[in-house]
Amino acid sequence: MRRDRYVDFLRAWAILLVMLGHWLITGLVRRPDGEIGAPELLATVPWTQWLTLGFQIMPLFFLAGGYAAAGSWARARAGGGTAAGWVGQRAVRLLLPAGVYSGLVLTAVGVCSALGVDPFTLALVGWAMAMQFWFLPVYLLLSALTPALHALHRRRGPRVPAGMAAAALVIGVLDVAADVTYVGALNYVLVWGVVYQLGFCWRDGLVGGRRSLLVVLAVGGGAGFAALVGFGPFPVSLILVTGQDPGNTNPPSAAMLAWATAQVGLCLLVAPAVRRWLERERVWRAVRMTGAASMTLYLWHMLPVLVIAAAFYLTGLAPQPAFGSAAWWGWRVPWLLVLGVVLVGVVRMLWPLERALALLDVGARPDASGLRRTWALWAGLGLSVGALTYFAGHGFAPDGRFPVWPAVASGVGLVLVVWRRGPAGHMGDEDGAGARDEGSLEEAA
């Protein structure tokens, strides 16, 4: 099957918007005591919550991820691969760079803590370096469930995401109206799983070629979102805002599901026009370059913020207009440009590490003859999901302290996932390219 360039474009576009969105909402101020603070823009300047409608781009990650996973698992299964082998290979590709990143950040946290760095500053830095991590445990879970989810897809097709959406709505009502503790967490898998399953349907031609269905998804999803925000209990912000209850992301709400549905319909409606644009060699080269560095960009894009904070804010060189004022917004332009320049330097510095990880033949293919042989993979996935979830919710330095047990769980989980590895095997890119080239962020982002 010929490679669909539009899938690669969705990954690259999503990565760029995630970076830009995080940079845009991160506002630094130098406090009277000389320390750095980071007021929450969405809470301090409420109208900016409308901007999240354009920057909440995570549905594209899961849509492209489902498309890629469907093809990858189908080819592996046809070639005699096992579910454990396939899940292990994808988990290693995601956890190796994330583990290296976490290890380096945790090492820095440990050194700074030992040197007596201010706990507030350390907690702020630890939060900034982990703010993007929520995506990783959810995607790991969906990857682990892919063989079962794809089997359901082969039997039921679009009825699977429809059923998952219905279940997500019921759970959302229980979470918001009945206040059933913790039940809402299921919607991390159900809501994002709906979009992931739609990626399966897209690859098999069940939605992408049906323009009327795409119009229904786009218009119906948009109308549903407007109703849930205008007449329902949900805020317009599609990013977590302190004090908002209920919110739309923690866990994903019915409004998030509606917006994700609209976004899927819209992006598939414009796919033919964008595919024609992607036939231009310069455009396609830029997309491939962004995709090749996607994991590095995703993990490390907040490091430039810390560099600029140290160079310009701690030293008092940065201008200090009133937070959210017209002058403050004017300074957003050079802020974004400088961050972009610093990020280019970070990517170039980390490129040898990225290539080293890409060249490691660590495709996990545990023997699937029984749980006795694959326990390490599943135990490692469980520990990794738990550790990543903790970092996403608390940062790398909660309350300015080193997170001992999450750090141990992260390291042990990575070792267990990598431990029972064998030959990588051919996962089968759609154009014959190496599996790493299908998208550095685990073939999905």
Image: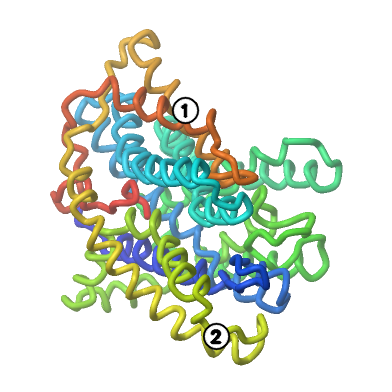
The type of residue carrying mark 2 is Pro
Dot 2 alpha-carbon crowd within 10 angstroms: few under 14, some 14 to 19, many 20 or more: few
Q: How far apart are marks 1 and 2 (CA)?
A: 41 Å
Residue 185 pos. (x, y %): 66, 39
Q: Is residue 129 toward the left or the right of residue 237 in the image?
A: left
Depth check, mark 1 against mark 2: the one in front is 2
Image label count:
2
Q: What element carries label 2?
A: loop
Residue 442 pos. (x, y %): 33, 46
Q: Is residue 210 toward the left or the right of residue 89 in the image?
A: right
The type of residue carrying mark 1 is Val
Residue 124, picture quadrant: bottom right
In the rendered image, the quadrant that contains the C terminus is bottom left
Residue 400 pos. (x, y %): 60, 46
- Residue furthest left in the image: 432
Dot 1 alpha-carbon crowd within 10 angstroms: few under 14, some 14 to 19, many 20 or more: few
Residue 414 in view = yes
Give the mark, 1 or 2, whose residue is nearer the N terminus.
Answer: 2
The residue nearer to you, when weighing 310 against 433, is 310
Numbered label attached to residue 408: 1
Numbered label attached to residue 135: none
Colour mapping used in the image: rainbow
- 145 up-or-down from 325: above or below: above
Which residue: 43% across, 56% down?
61
Residue on which disc 2 sits = 319
Residue 261 pos. (x, y %): 57, 60
